[in-house]
Image: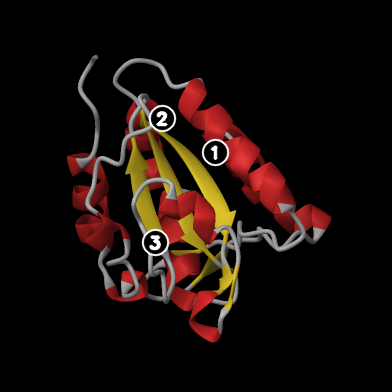
Amino acid sequence: MTRAAALALLVAAPVLGSPVAAETSAAHPEARPFDESVSDALYAQELEQAIAQLEPGRRVLAVFGANWCHDSRALAGWLTSPGFEPLLDAHFEVVFIDVGEPQEGDGRNLDLAARFGVTGIEGTPNLLVIDSKGTLVNTPESAKGWRNAASRSEEAVYAIIASYAGEAE
């Protein structure tokens, strides 16, 4: 899903009753973009397409999470918030991928993360930064280090995401 499509769903969600509806909390916005009804094959296709269509200097932010997860909703909320829009529009394609409940042994799409060297996922969310060559930019450890996303400030999340902005290739 392109950033524009994600934002369109976010805006339309309250009207449509979609699970992408934004919520507001005192500390952070929340969004629910992880769709359990989307097939694993479609998630794989969306990720591959996002990588293949990257323009020079852009990267994919692949967010592996779940709507049941407070931290996944928080990270998704920041990534769909107006304050992040200029950064994301200039440097990233955002793809949200539902992973089910990996900590309960009921994970899904974990093979997609494993293709980029991120294995042993036991919680959510996970943030993979992927360049146009299909290479993981961040480390597997940093990709898995977002389980406290709801307790991070907007400034902290923004700074980390900005640090992954690519240079012209």
Which of the pair 22/126 is nearer the observer? Answer: 126
Q: Residue 85, how many percent across, how many down?
A: 41, 38
Comparing marks 2 and 1, which lies closer to the viewer? 1
Mark 1, residues whose alpha carbon is within 10 Å: few (<14), some, or many (≥20)? many
Please tell me which residue is depicted at 64% across the width and 36% down the height of the picture.
45
**Image height of 132 relative to 23, above or below:** above
Image quadrant where one finds the C terminus = top left
Disc number placed over residue 47 in the picture, else none: 1
**Image height of 103 relative to 31, above or below:** below
Disc number placed over residue 89 in the picture, else none: 2
Q: Earlier in the sequence, mark 1 or mark 3?
A: 1
Whether residue 39 appears in this view of the structure is yes
Cα distance between the residues tagged 1 and 3 = 14 Å
Which of the pair 4/122 is nearer the observer? Answer: 122
- Quarter holding residue 27: bottom left
Disc number placed over residue 32 in the picture, else none: none
Q: Amino acid at mark 1?
A: Leu
Comparing marks 3 and 2, which lies closer to the viewer? 3
Left or right side of 29 for 162: left
Disc number placed over residue 126 in the picture, else none: 3
Q: Residue 166, how many percent across, how many down?
A: 24, 28
Q: Residue 168, how many percent across, how many down?
A: 23, 15
